[in-house]
Amino acid sequence: MESPSRSSVIIIGAGVSGISTAKVLAENGVEDLVILEASDRIGGRIRKEDFGGVPVELGAGWIAGVGGKESNPVWELADKSGLRTCFSDYSNARYNIYDKSGKIYPSGIAADSYKKAVESAIRKLRNEEANPCGGGNNVCKVTEPPSMPNTPMELAIDFVLHDFEMAEVEPISTYLDFGEREFLVADERGYEYLLYKMAEDFLFTSEGKILDSRLKLNKVVRELQHSRNGVTVITEDGSVYEANYVILSVSIGVLKSQLISFNPPLPRWKTEAIERCDVMVYTKIFLKFPYKFWPCGPGKEFFLYAHERRGYYTFWQHMENAYPGSNILVVTLTNGESKRVEAQPDSDTLKEAMGVLRDMFGPNIPDATDILVPRWFTNRFQCGSYSNYPLISNGQEFHGIQAPIGRIFFTGEHTSERFSGYVHGAYLAGIDTGKALVEEMGKESTERNSSCSENQAFLLEPLLALTGSLTLTQTETVQALHKCDIPTQLYLSSKIGIQEAIL
C-alpha cells in the first residue's frame, strides 16, 4: 500500500469554524492543508433544505447581534454577500399566548408573568453566585427560593426565557457587543452561502461549487493518532492522512461521543472539561398548509401554546414575513421533547402538532400537507445543536476545551467563551485557532532553524578543518544532516563528500 502523503495541517470538519480556520491558514501561506468533512456538504450545523417551495434553515437560522456600536462579523459577511434577511422580534411572543381553549391570555397578565419569571431567574442566579455549594467547608446559605413556574402560561414563559433565549438572564455578550437586533436568513442560496463565499477565497471553485481536491467530503474520521512528531488520521473508509498538526472543529456533541478515538487517549483534564459542557438540542419542525389560518401582521410572527407539559409544542412562528404566501409554520422543540420527537415517526409528530394547532385555532383548520423534522441529536456527525455551558462558570471549562493537546488544536462555537452557541462564535473561534496555529508553526520553524544552525557549526568544525581528526561516523553525520533543511543538506554534504548518502 502506498504511503499516505503528508500535509502541514489537517482540519476535521467543514463547518463555520473549520472553514474560517482554513481561510486564516491560507492567508498566512499554509496551502498544503487538507479538510476532511464527514458529510457530503460543507456547513455543519448550517443547513438549507427546500420545503414547500422555499428554502428553510434546519439549523442556524438567525444572525443574532446587529445594530450596536460594534459590527457583528457574520452580519458583515451577509451584507457583503447580499444575503437576504428579515428582522425578527420574538419578544412579542409573550403577548400571543394561547391556552388549550384557543383564548389568548390578556397582554397585561402575560407581561407581568414574564417580568416575574425574569426576576425569579435573576434571583436564582444571584443565590448560586453568592452561595456556591461544594465540598470542604463550604456552606450553602438558605435564602429566598425563586418561584417555580406552575401554570401552563408560566411554563410557556419559562420555556421561552430559558430554552429559546439561550438560557441566559444576564446581559448576553452578543447583544452587548454587537447590538440587540436579530435577523432571520431568508435567502434562496441559504445561510450556507456565506461559507461558500469564504471558501472561494482559498479553495478552487467553479460555478458555485467547490472543486478543490484539498476538501474531501464523505470522510468520517474514526481514529486520531498523535505524537511529538505529527498526527495520523484514519477514516472510516480506511483512508490514512498524515500531517504536522490537526485542527478538530467537530461539535461538542461529537467530542462527547465515541465517534473519534484518540491514540494515545486524551488526558483526563481534557475529557472532564468536555463532559462538563452540556449539549443543547434544538429542533425546528416545519409544517406546510394549503392556506394560512393564523393571525399575521405586526407583532404576530411568533406565538406560544400554553400546556401543562413544559416545552410541548410551545414556540411557534409563521414564515409569511420571510416568504409571503408560503403558508408554512415552524414549531421549535428543545432537549427532552426534541429527543422524543426524533425517535418517533413523523406521522406521530404531525398528529401531535395538528392537535395543538386545533386547540389554538379550532377544529376546522386544514391538515398540513407536508412536514419536515430535522434530527440533530441522532445525527452522529452532530449529536446535538450547540454547547450549553453552566450559568455559573469560572472560565475553566472554556479554557480546558480550548487548550491544545500536543499537535491537536480544538475549535468551534464551544471554544468561544463570549459567544458560545452562536454562528459568529464559531466564526471567531476559527479565526483565533488559525492565528494560534500559525504562531505555533512559526515558533517550531524558528526552533528547527536554530537547531540546524547548531548542527551546522557542530559538523563544520571537525569536517572542514584543515587539521584534526574526523569525530563523527558517516551514519551519525547523515542523521544530523537530516535535521537540516534541503539546501543546507546539499551544501554540507557536498563539502564533506557524502552526498550520495544524503540523497
Image (spheres, rainbow, N blue to C red):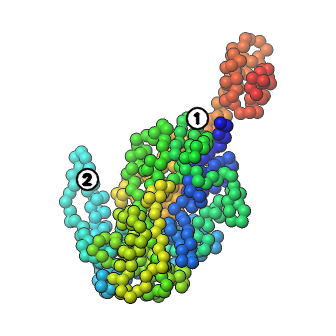
Instruction: Point out residue 477 in the picture as x, y percentages from the top left corner.
Output: 70, 21
Q: Secondary structure at mark 1?
A: loop
Looking at the rendering, which quadrant does residue 384 occupy?
bottom left
Residue 319 as seen in the image, left or right of residue 472: left
Query: Which amino acid, mark 1?
Result: Asn
Residue at 46% from the left image edge and 50% from the top image edge: 255
Q: In front here: 230 or 54? A: 54
User: Which residue is rendered at x = 42% and y = 80% of the image?
Assistant: 302
For mark 2, what is the residue?
A: 133
Name the residue type under label 2: Cys
The residue closer to the viewer here, 317 or 202, is 317
Q: Please tell me how many numbered marks the rendered image carries.
A: 2
- For residue 238, above or below residue 74: above
Quadrant position of residue 333: bottom left
Q: Where's residue 440, x and y in %?
A: 59, 43
- The answer to whether residue 270 of the structure is visible from this angle is yes
Q: Give x and y (percent) for residue 487.
A: 76, 33
Q: Residues within 10 Å of mark 2 (few under 14, many from 20)?
A: few
Q: Is residue 179 visible?
A: no
For label 1, the crowd category at 10 Å Cα-Cα, with few meaning under 14, some 14 to 19 and many 20 or more, is few
- The relative height of residue 85 versus residue 198 in the rendered view (above or below) is below
Quadrant for the C terminus in the image: top right
Residue 229 disc label: 1
Residue 301 image position (x, y, % from top left): 45, 82
* Sequence-first tag of 2 and 1: 2
| Left or right for 103, reference 241 | left
Between 349 and 89, which is closer to the camera in this rendering? 349
Q: Considering the numbered disc 2 on the image, is that residue within a helix, a strand or a loop?
A: loop
**Which quarter shows the N terminus?**
top right
Which residue appears at 36% of the width and 60% of the height? 391
